[in-house]
Image (cartoon, coloured by chain):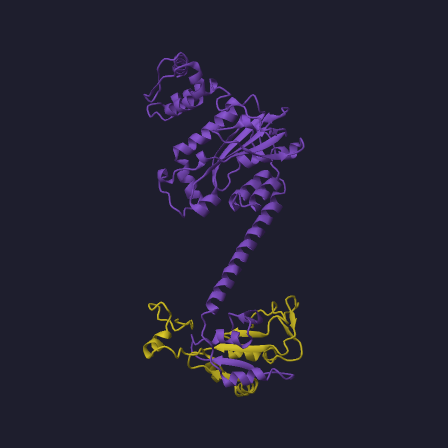
Amino acid sequence: MHVLKTRFIKQAKMGLPAAMPDGAVLTFSSVKAFEKKKAHVLLQWWHAAAGCGDLSDDSRVFARRAFVQNYDPGLFVTPYEDTGKCLNRPTCLLTYNGAWGKLNVSELAGYARDLSADELVARVREHRPARRIFDTVVYFFLETQRRVFNGACVTAELCMDTYRHSGVVRVLIHVWVDMGRRKNIEVVSLKLNDVLPHTSVVCLQRSTKQKYSGAFYTWVDKIGSLWSAGTVLPWMHYGVRDTWITDLFATHKINKATARGLYIRAISNAKRNVGNLEFVVTANDKKRLNAQEAATKRRMQGSFRPWRVLPEVDDWNCHYECDQYRYRFLVLDGPSRMGKTRYCGSLVGMAECWWWIVRGL
Amino acid sequence: MIPDLSKFVRGTHELILFDNMSAQAVLAHKKVFQASVDRVCLGNSPTNLNMVSLWLWKIRMVIASNCWQADVAAASTADVGWLSQNSVNVYVHEPLWEPDVSASSVDRESEEYCCNQRCRSPFPPYSQT
């Protein structure tokens, strides 16, 4: 494979026809023309090799290794543009959000508008173009840029908000990089597929405590996460702080089960954090249920017919207006489904002012 | 014997509805249902651990039942006398909501049923418009 690729490049540079693994024959008029299209051609070559059904797993691994070893670090670097924007912090979180991340939903098997996050993730994981996007970024940062950064972590995830609002399936790439002692790396040098990354500084100081929160962010199995890869792993290269997990749960990035598992694995304050988590989830469920109950009652109250006027009940209600030592109570006796219970609510007006005990004895 | 009244909030709740309360339970807690000016203590036990003291004066007490007459018939003469003197008994023999007079006779017949005709339920009293 390595020989094949070398031969291909050599032939192409010499202006001779070069055969691609998928059968296509390319000819470049000059070395300059080859340099111009090198990035595209090499990527296409790799995808053709990776997608070749005849290759065994071992061959595929060998092809990948051969490709990576000869990967030109400047492959994706576009002509230099002085944007003046540099990465000058110890660690940075880069976000690639380009048009290439927008998937063609007609190619997604079993795509529907109302899929859950897990179902959508399962379908996109089978989508080869999405995987190629992730592979490209992984090779760029973990292999070709290995000498530039002290460590890097890459994750691909779905933008669930976009899917919920418009049904569009969009893949985002987050990359965390540890720049070590390096300073002033131009952002433009990290341009991938004509997309400049959005950069957010993870920590201002060279604090080892906060330094790896971005790496953890890329590693954790968030809602909508597709794949992740990295050279810096939690609990192996750095410790995980429980506040990072709390932040992720508070911003709805991870679900309860994931947060619970991470708290336990983080050990620090595990018992308290799991207790807090249970409390918060229960309180949120209760709040949601109360809101649903109130909305249902409001909706139904608008469709009630007016109640009958019962003279006996009016007299009973009036006898509370004067002060007495003791009062009479009201008994509404009769068959079921006559509206007795709801009628009681009308006696005091506002629904909040009457108290309904469901089970009597 | 009596439902938990510890969560009753005076000033917020103006009426207490005891749904399906039996006459025997009422007779066992006469002072509660009279909305007396004196405080009542509920939840007594040998240690009074869960005792709650309530001031239920002028709080409207309503009992909804579909077997009240049978309960009263089973009570003693003295209890029947106490119940008749301390309660206003209203027998509900027809729906308590106003009928839809604008509807035709056929609609009036169907209005007593739920909008889902299969369930044939006379409740809730929704408007058909």
**Location of residue A357 in the rendering, given as x and y in whole percent from the top left corner:** 53, 70
Task: Please name whichever residue, B5 or A299, is drawn nearer the observer in this view of the structure.
Answer: A299
In this rendering, would B49 be left or right of A119?
right
Q: In this view, does A124 lie above or below A345?
A: above
Task: Please name whichever residue, A222 or A158, is drawn nearer the observer in this view of the structure.
Answer: A158
Task: Please name whichever residue, A319 or B100, is drawn nearer the observer in this view of the structure.
Answer: B100
Quarter assignment of residue B46? bottom right
Q: Name the image quarter holding the N terminus of chain A.
A: top left
Q: Is residue A226 above or below residue A47?
A: below
Q: Hue of chain B?
A: yellow
In this rendering, would A323 be left or right of A228?
right
For the point 39% across and 47% down, the residue is A113
For the point 59% across and 38% down, the residue is A266
**Location of residue B35 in the rendering, given as x and y in whole percent from the top left corner:** 61, 79
Task: Please name whichever residue, B16 or B33, is drawn nearer the observer in this view of the structure.
Answer: B16
Residue A57 in view of the camera: no
Q: Is residue A214 above or below residue A352?
A: above
Q: In this view, does B32 lie above or below A75?
A: below
Residue A246 in view of the camera: yes
Q: Hue of chain A?
A: purple
**Location of residue A90 in the rendering, given as x and y in whole percent from the top left corner:** 63, 29
In this rendering, would A305 be left or right of A327?
left
**Location of residue A182 in the rendering, given as x and y in whole percent from the top left corner:** 62, 24
